[in-house]
Image: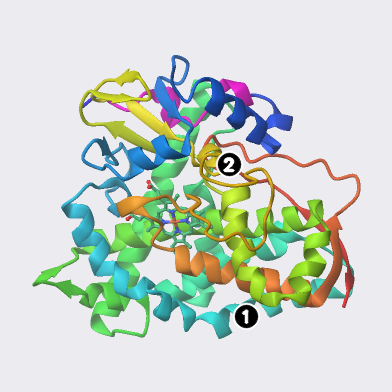
């Protein structure tokens, strides 16, 4: 199989989005691409792009044709194909059932309250730094079994895992690769250490559970346990941060929603779902063609990269009525914000719960939530992530 092209690995945005305004609101560009070139090859990034709902779903539901195996540090379920994928996923699934996650609700509420408390009387806060970033990091640290004293280091490691290059240059790319490698090594050593401790003295945490988990006589290797912990940080933290921030951005852009959700708190869950469709934290998902395949009248060759634009598929009017409107109680809502098929986000119940608690609490404690005046929004520099770097808000205390 062909090596992943450099430029793709460097996560450069598609050329139509090489401008901050468009990165902050890429949906018009997605609509044009979906209409005009639903499946196209991009010479610059050396990959295929797929924009329609139906085609994206086809790619994601056919792991036999489109592989998830990519060049990444360490192997994890995200980058494995069946049958290995199913084995890994079944083993860890028990920790992530909706029931197991729902039990975390009181603690998530407590953390949210603690994070908000210092900011309520001042009428302003940095939504991302003060709430949307620390909340998922603390929750995942506690779930895995990271001692509170290691939290600061843990957050730094977690940040580096998803960091993007400072620009498109080869030096920036090399520098980032080096930093990431060092980071993975540190995380590896750290988790190995905790694992050894839990082996001797199991606790009520995920690491102990993973060490013990068994299906048909098969256990996870130590390497797989550590890789899984690292995957949770990489896949779960920044994504949840952006889900919370994107949801609040919608509330601030469409203030009438605030009253609607405050009066009907039972709609908060479906509003979170609609956020995943309307402003999804992950807009694109990568695969590699395993064989020569025809898609949308185009000939994709074995070994070529295929990027599925769920950000575009989620606004496809063939699938969704009023596709460009935020409909807080949309039903059904078959968005692909958590992906689709066998790799469908394992952490979805946790992300949903955290976002629900965060939104519900903000709406209960605050009124007239809005972006602080004179803020210039900066898009996150990544081809795959949709979000902003900072989101300072102002509000009236309730
Ligand atoms: C997979 C999105 C939160 C763990 C995925 C995929 C997407 C996604 C799109 C599919 C990737 C693919 O098909 O290649 C999101 C979003 C989140 C979120 C938008 C927050 C709003 C989380 C959380 C965790 C998590 C909180 C864990 C604590 C995972 C794992 C996979 C995954 C382990 C791989 C599943 C597999 O390969 O079978 N996520 N995720 N995610 N996510 Fe999430």
Q: CA distance from mark 2 to mark 1?
A: 32 Å
- Residue shown at the point (51%, 44%) measured from the top left: 319
Q: Nearer the viewer, residue 321 or 340?
A: 321
- Mark 1 Cβ inside 8 Å of ligand 1: no
Task: Provide residue 74's location: percent of width, then percent of height.
Answer: 29, 48
Instruction: Specify the farthest residue to the top.
Output: 43
Instruction: Look at the numbered disc 2 and give the secondary structure of its residue.
Output: loop
- Residue shown at the point (32%, 60%) measured from the top left: 228
Identify the magenta region.
3-17
| Colour option used | rainbow
Instruction: Look at the numbered disc 1 and give the secondary structure of its residue.
Output: helix
Quarter in which the C terminus is drawn: bottom right
Q: Quadrant of residue 329?
A: bottom right
Q: Nearer the viewer, residue 297 or 337?
A: 297
Q: Quadrant of ligand 1?
A: bottom left
Quarter in which the N terminus is drawn: top left
Q: Mark 1 sits on what residue?
A: 109
Q: Mark 2 sits on what residue?
A: 315
Residue 385 belongs to magenta span: no
């Amino acid at each position: 199989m062909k090596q992943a092209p450099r430029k793709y690995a460097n996560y450069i945005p598609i050329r139509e989005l090489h401008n901050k305004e468009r990165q902050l609101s890429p949906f018009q560009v997605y609509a044009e691409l979906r209409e005009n070139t639903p499946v196209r090859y991009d010479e610059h990034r050396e990959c295929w792009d797929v924009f329609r709902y139906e085609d994206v779903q086809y790619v994601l539901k056919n792991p036999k044709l489109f592989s998830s195996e990519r060049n990444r540090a360490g192997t994890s379920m995200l980058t494995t194909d069946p049958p290995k994928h199913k084995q890994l996923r079944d083993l860890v699934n028990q920790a992530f059932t909706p029931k197991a996650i729902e039990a975390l609700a009181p603690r998530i509420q407590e953390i949210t309250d603690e994070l908000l408390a210092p900011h309520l009387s001042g009428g302003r806060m940095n939504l991302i730094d003060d709430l949307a970033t620390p909340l998922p990091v603390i929750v995942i640290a506690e779930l895995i079994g990271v001692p509170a004293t290691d939290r600061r280091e843990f957050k730094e490691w977690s940040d580096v895992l998803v960091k993007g290059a400072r620009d498109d240059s080869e030096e920036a790319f090399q520098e980032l690769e080096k930093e990431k490698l060092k980071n993975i090594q540190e995380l590896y050593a750290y988790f190995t250490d905790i694992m050894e401790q839990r082996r001797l003295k199991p606790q009520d945490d995920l690491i102990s559970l993973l060490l013990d988990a068994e299906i048909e006589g098969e256990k996870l290797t130590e390497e797989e346990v550590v890789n899984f912990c690292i995957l949770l940080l990489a896949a779960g933290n920044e994504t949840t941060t952006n889900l919370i921030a994107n949801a609040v951005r919608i509330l601030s852009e469409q203030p009438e929603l605030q009253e609607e959700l405050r009066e009907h708190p039972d709609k908060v869950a479906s509003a979170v779902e609609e956020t995943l469709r309307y402003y999804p934290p992950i807009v694109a998902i990568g695969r590699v063609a395993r064989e020569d395949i025809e898609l949308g009248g185009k000939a994709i060759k074995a070994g070529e990269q295929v990027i599925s634009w769920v950000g575009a598929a989620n606004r496809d009017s063939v699938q969704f009525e009023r596709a460009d409107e935020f409909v807080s109680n949309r039903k059904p809502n078959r968005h692909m914000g958590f992906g689709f098929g066998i790799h469908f986000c394992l952490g979805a119940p946790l992300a949903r719960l955290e976002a629900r608690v965060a939104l519900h609490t903000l709406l209960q404690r605050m009124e007239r939530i809005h972006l602080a005046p004179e803020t210039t929004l900066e898009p996150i520099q990544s081809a795959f992530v949709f979000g902003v770097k900072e989101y300072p808000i102002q509000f009236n205390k309730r």
